[in-house]
Image (cartoon, rainbow, N blue to C red):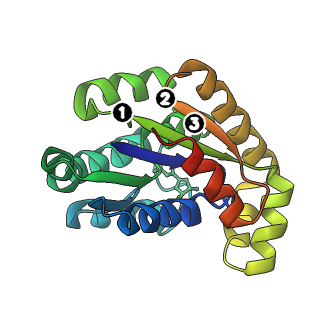
Amino acid sequence: MFISFEGIDGCGKSTQARLLVRHLEARGTPVLFNREPGGSDGAEAVRALLVEGDPGRWSPVSELLLYMAARRDNLERRIAPALARGDWVVSDRWTDSTRVYQATRGGDRAVVDALQDLVIAREPDLTFVIDMDPERALTRGLARGGEEDRFEQLGLDFQRTIRAGYAALARDYPGRIRIVDGDAAPEAVADRVRALLP
Ligand code: TMP
């Protein structure tokens, strides 16, 4: 099984990805945890190009090419071998992030989909979108520190657009994407996630 977690910044998806990994390990399922962009050495090097420096340093198209380059390298070196061994993979974001974020930042969704088909050609078997009101995510982020920079940089309206983007994507992929209400204690959200596992 290849499972991804998606959602707006501060929705708690990284916590949920880690809780699912812990649950799978506890029941004896071999599992690889992955965080996008990143993973392989090459993908981590590309990650630095994406997350450091001026937010406007890349054009929308070059930005999405970098995300796809990082993903391809990580897929070849870590994800595909793990799946071939029969391990589970739990990924904190995958191409749905590129579909939603890069389209919102001025990239072309058709280009993302074409590149996905050409160079990645692997969708998760199951995707959890951890849904949360952006204002609530912002308050939570401020309470625990660490998320406020990104919200300040991108803005509440941007996060609202991203949330709507995920809702639309869930309609495009009804068999794969499950929307999970993230507005509860992490363990309660994790129970909802586990209830949706095959
Ligand atoms: P994070 O919240 O999972 O740390 O993700 C880092 C940021 O990168 C987040 O704001 C979403 C963004 N992102 C994209 O814009 N496109 C992508 O393909 C991925 C994987 C992340």
Spot occupied by residue 146 in the image (x, y as percentages of width and height): 66, 77
Spot occupied by residue 194 in the image (x, y as percentages of width and height): 55, 50
Q: In this view, does 91 lie to the left or right of 106?
A: left
Residue 104 picture quarter: top right
Amino acid at dot 1: Glu
Residue pictured at 21% horizontal, 67% vertical: 41
Q: How crowded is mark 1: few (under 14 residues within 10 Å), some or many (20 or more)?
A: some
Q: Name the residue under label 1.
A: 123
Residue 148 picture quarter: bottom right
Secondary element at image label 3? helix
Q: Nearer the viewer, residue 86 or 157?
A: 86
Q: Residues within 10 Å of mark 2 (few under 14, many from 20)?
A: some
Q: Nearer the viewer, residue 181 or 93?
A: 181
Marking on residue 176? 2
Residue 46 visible? The answer is no
Amino acid at dot 3: Val
Q: Is residue 4 left or right of residue 185?
A: left
Give the CA distance from mark 3 to mark 1. Answer: 15 Å
Residue pictured at 80% horizontal, 52% vertical: 134
Q: Mark 3 points at which residue?
A: 100
Mark 3 and mark 1 residues within 8 Å of each other at the beta carbon: no
The answer to which of marks 1 and 2 sits earlier in the sequence is 1
Residue pictured at 19% horizontal, 47% vertical: 86
Residue 136 picture quarter: bottom right
Q: Is residue 193 left or right of residue 4?
A: right
